Image: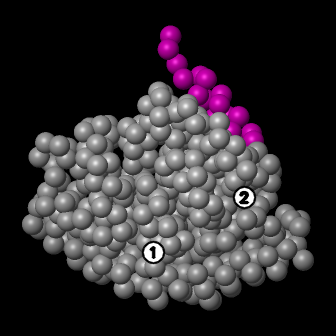
Amino acid sequence: MANWNTLEKELEQLQKEGRYRPLTVWESGSGAWMTLKGRSVLQMSSNNYLGLTDHPDMKEAAIRAVEKYGVGSGSVRTITGTLDIHDQLEHELAKFKGTEAALVFQSGFTANQGVLASLLGPDDVVISDELNHASIIDGIRLTKAQRKVFAHKDMDQLEAALKESAGFQKRIVVTDGVFSMDGDIAPLPTIVALAEKYDAFVYVDDAHASGVLGKNGKGSTDHFGLHGRVHIQIGTLSKAVGAVGGYVACEQVVKDYLIHKARPFLFSTSQTPAVAATCLSAIQVLQQSSDLIAKLWENAAYFRSKVQALGFDTGASETPIIPVIVGNPAKTMQFSDLLLQEGVYAQGIVYPTVAMDKGRVRFIVTAQHTREDLDFALHALHKAGKQLNLSMN
C-alpha cells in the first residue's frame, strides 16, 4: 500500500538535527514590528529593506487598478493577459535600469528559470559562482549547457574557466549582485573585465541589490558604473520594491526572444493589475527614495559595528544583510529561538541552505528600524549569546 513513510522519516531526522522549522504565521502586515501570537515582535528577517510594503502611494495605486481592471488579468501574456499597465511597467523598468527593454515575470525565481533555460543550449557554457542563489542553480539545471563553477568571488578560477571555454558558442558568467546569505557584494568590475577579455556575456541577479545598491536603488550595475557592459540584469519586485514579481532588464532582441521561448512567461497568467500598478508606483517612489536608502545604509553600518563589538562573527557582510555565524545547525536554531523569547525575530539559516558548519542567524536591517529598535536587538543578542556561551567580548 502506498504511503509517505520515507517523508516522515526524513522529517523526523530534520527534527533530531534541530533543522525542522514550521511556518511562522504573522497577524499583521510587514513592518519593523509585527504581531506574532498576539505579541509585538521586532522583525529582523524581512526583505522589506525600504519599508515600501505599506507606502501610501503604492497602496492607492493598487486600489485604483482593482477599480479599473478588476482583480485578475485573465490569461497568460501571449494571449489576452498583457494589459496596458503591464506594458507601462516594463517601459518604466527599462528606463530605470538604463536598458533597451525589460520583461516581467511572476517572481525573481521564475525569471532566473525562464531566462537561463531559454538562453543556454547544448553548445553553450554557463560559469557560475558557487554561492549563487538557488533559483540560478535550478535555472542552470533546466539547460543542456555545459556547467562550470568557480569558488566564491575567486577571479583566478573564473579566468581559468573562461580560458577553458573558448570552444563554446555562448559563454555566460552568472553571479548574484549581493549574496543573500553572507551579505557581500560581487566583484562586478573584475567579472565584467574578464568577460570582455574572453568574449563572454555577464548575467547579474540583483535580487538583494534592487532598491539597495546604486543611485535610487538601481542595482549593482549602476553602483559600479557598468551600464552597457552587463548584458542581463535580473531584478526583483518582491524585496526592497515592496510588492511581488521579477524581471529581466536587457536588450530588445533578448526580450523578444524570451517572449517566445521562456516557459514561465509563456505558461503563467500575468501579474494581477493591482500588483503591476503597485510596482509601477514603486519605480516612482524609488526615484525619490535617496533619503530612505541613506537611512538603510546608516542603520546597517551601525548595527554591524555593534554586533562585531559584541564579539560575534558577521562573516563577509558589507550590506544590510548581517549574518551572525554560529556553526552547528541545532545551536543556530536554539539561538534564534532565544532571540524570539527576547522579542526579536531573526531566522536561523542552516544546511542545506548554507554549509553544515556555517549555520547563522541572519539579520536584515531596514530603513524602517529606529536606533532604539537596533539597540533593542543588540541587547537581545548579548543576552542570548551569553546563555549559549557563544564567543563574545
Residue 358 visible somewhere in the drawing: yes
Q: Bin the neighbour count of mark 1 within 10 Å (Cα to Cα): few under 14, some 14-19, many 20 and up.
A: many
**The quadrant where residue 39 appears:** bottom right
User: Relative to residue 334, is residue 33 depicted above or below?
Assistant: below
Please give the residue where the numbered disc 2 appears in the rendered image: 360
The colour scheme is one colour
The Cα atoms of the two marked residues, 2 and 1, are separated by 27 Å
C-beta proximity under 8 Å, tags 2 and 1: no
Which residue lies at the image location 80% right of the left edge and 67% below the top edge? 313
List x then y, in percent, for residue 304.
71, 77
Amino acid carrying label 1: it is Gly
Please give the residue where the numbered disc 1 appears in the rendered image: 217
Which residue lies at the image location 78% right of the left edge and 70% below the top edge? 384
List x then y, in percent, for residue 196.
54, 54
Q: Is residue 7 magenta?
A: yes
Q: Is residue 133 magenta?
A: no
Q: Bin the neighbour count of mark 2 within 10 Å (Cα to Cα): few under 14, some 14-19, many 20 and up.
A: many
What secondary structure prevails in the magenta region?
Answer: helix
Residue 18 visible somewhere in the drawing: no
Which residue lies at the image location 16% right of the left edge and 52% below the top edge? 82
List x then y, in percent, for residue 311.
85, 74
Amino acid carrying label 2: it is Arg
The segment highlighted magenta reads 1-20
Q: Nearer the viewer, residue 370 or 302?
A: 302
User: Relative to residue 67, is residue 331 depicted above or below?
Assistant: above
Q: Nearer the viewer, residue 167 or 16?
A: 167
